[in-house]
Amino acid sequence: IERPASIVKELVENSIDAGSTRIQIQLEQSGLTLIEVTDNGIGIERAELPLAFERHATSKLATEKDLFRIQTLGFRGEALPSIASVARVTITSRTEHAPEGASMQVAGGECQPLIPAPCNLGTTIKVEDLFYNTPVRLKYLKSLQTELGHCLEIVQKLALAHPQISFQLIHQGKTHLQTQGDAQLLHAFSSIYGKELAKQMLQCLHTYRDHTVKGIIGLPAISRANRNHGLLFLNGRPIRHFGILNAIQEAYGHRLPIHRFPLFALDLELDYSLVDVNVHPTKLEVRFSEEADIRTAVREAVEQALDQQQLIPAFGASVPKVSPNRIITNENYEQVSLPQLPQQRRTESFRTGEVREQVQEIYRPLSPQLESKPNESPASTDQAENPAAGRLLQLKPVAQLLGMYVVAENPDGMYIIDQHAAHERILFERFSRNYNERNVSPMPLLVPLTRELTPGEKTAFERLQSELSLLAFDMELFGEFALVVRAVPDVWAGQQPETLTMEFLDEWFQNMQTAASVIGKLEERIITKACKAAIKANQWLSMPEMAALCKGLDELQDPFHCPHGRPILLHFSHYELEKQFKRVM
């Protein structure tokens, strides 16, 4: 027991394990003078109340086999005696068939006699005067506000992990948290973080083999500067697992700017025998027997939820729009199923004349920068394999602004496109597709590069030499510890390939990375290549070139974000336009 939050955690978890549907937590002085947890669970038999405060006693395990299928949030039976050793504890409880309840006081680890007590079904545990007999521990506590924050954080996580339970936390007579307990995760999230943030969360549900991932994830526009806002649960237990967190980050991919992290609350449902929850004393860290499958399930769940959205920020708004096929109403946040991309109020007609014919008929651009390579036309992309299929924008260019932005329209309104970001994304996906399909060619260096290797680096190179060859690297050992580089991938053309090669080798050997990590490093170079090759600001485009750019967006896996995570388009709906011109009120 380190602080009041430690007691709140243990008592509330016991209430959850008791099958409660309502749990109330009352605090005074951030829990230092009072922590009272009341639930409507199954209660504790009168005769077993003293046993609950014996060390190593537990009511949560029936046989030794239960140790290998732990289905409760705790089982060791250490919490209550540990709490009673540093505070004054009063426990009152009644079971369903008992005519009345019973109460018992424990101070300094000594149990007082049981006495009858009228009470409702369930258990109330009152913890008073924390650390009264160990005052030295009080010196290690932070401010009252900080300690209250720790208590709130514990209850918030458990409330999101168990939306079927109504939680209430009261401090100094003021309610700081209240959830409905209606089993709707989005409602619990709204009660904690507010309606405005809840409206920017997407429902997530996916089953992969025997593993189910469910919960909510945030739109990329509400990303955070650290990982602290991502909540992960395992069968209702808050956990921390860096492998799964990385899988979530990978699923967001380039939708997030660099050094930004998603907001989410995801619960993993899997067989209890497939996980070890006793890796860490606080049970935050767990070990999976099928970790690869679980990471795949999580990554696919997040990718599917994001792929179904039109992640286009509304013009002049601070948050992006949610796609009409999965919206959250202001009143009850219920998921509403609507036709995919419903057509809003249509204009009478698009522009007529020569410009219209150019836009409709001309696809292949005149500029070599926008021109696709032979047999690589984006039009050949199989839409059945493209997650973006079904959410096509079908934009018609109208004009160019400031030499940087393309103004376009479709029946849903007006769009402003960052021409550099759009072209960068088109090139990035083309280059990436070539890499994934190993459709790259070696580019000979004018002068071969030589690098001396350590014994460890030599071993790493020999292990991955064949993979590097498939990626168009021509490298071989010369002598015992010298590495000679004669050719690099042609995607590095125009990027000082000699410098890039040495940087690439230094980074790779420094971390002794795997083949997958090698490809990850190459992706950084692909982004650089796409950025440098894309059209720039103050580069004026013809109407056919703008049409090609708009058409290219419809062929992309992600037409909403550049490889750096910045938005490609902004949207101004018909309603927003009419509202600005006072046509509607």
Image: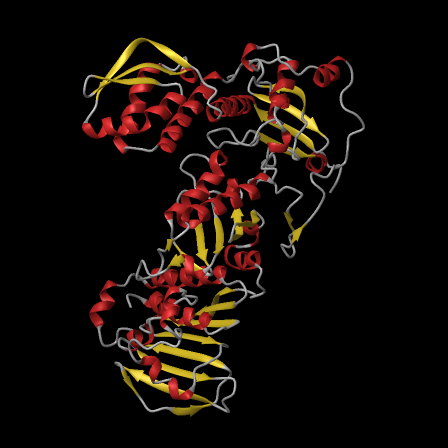
At x 48% / y 90%, what residue is drawn?
A: 100
Q: Nearer the viewer, residue 95 or 34?
A: 95
Question: Image quadrant for the C terminus?
Answer: top right
Q: Is residue 425 left or right of residue 246?
A: right
State the image coordinates of residue 4 (x, y, percent, origin top left).
33, 68
Horizontal and vertical percent position of residue 359: 70, 18
In-front residue for pair 31/312: 312
* Residue 224 shows up from this direction: no
Q: Looking at the image, which residue is at 19% across and 21% down?
A: 481
Residue in the picture at 52% in, 22% down: 430
Furthest residue toward top: 446
Name the foreground residue: 435 vs 369: 435
In the displayed structure, 55 sits above or below 341; it is: below
266 w.r.t. 538: above or below: below
Q: State whether residue 495 appears in this view.
A: yes
The residue that appears at 40% across and 27% down in the rendered structure is 524
From the viewer's perspective, tell me whether residue 167 is left or right of residue 386: left
Query: Seen in the image, is 111 located left or right of residue 162?
Result: left
Pick out the residue farthest to the right: 348
Residue 532 in the image: state x and y as whole percent.
Answer: 45, 18
Q: How is the image coloured?
A: secondary structure
Instruction: Give the quarter of the figure containing the N terminus.
Output: bottom left
Q: Foreground: 123 or 126?
A: 123
Percent of width and height locating residue 475: 31, 18
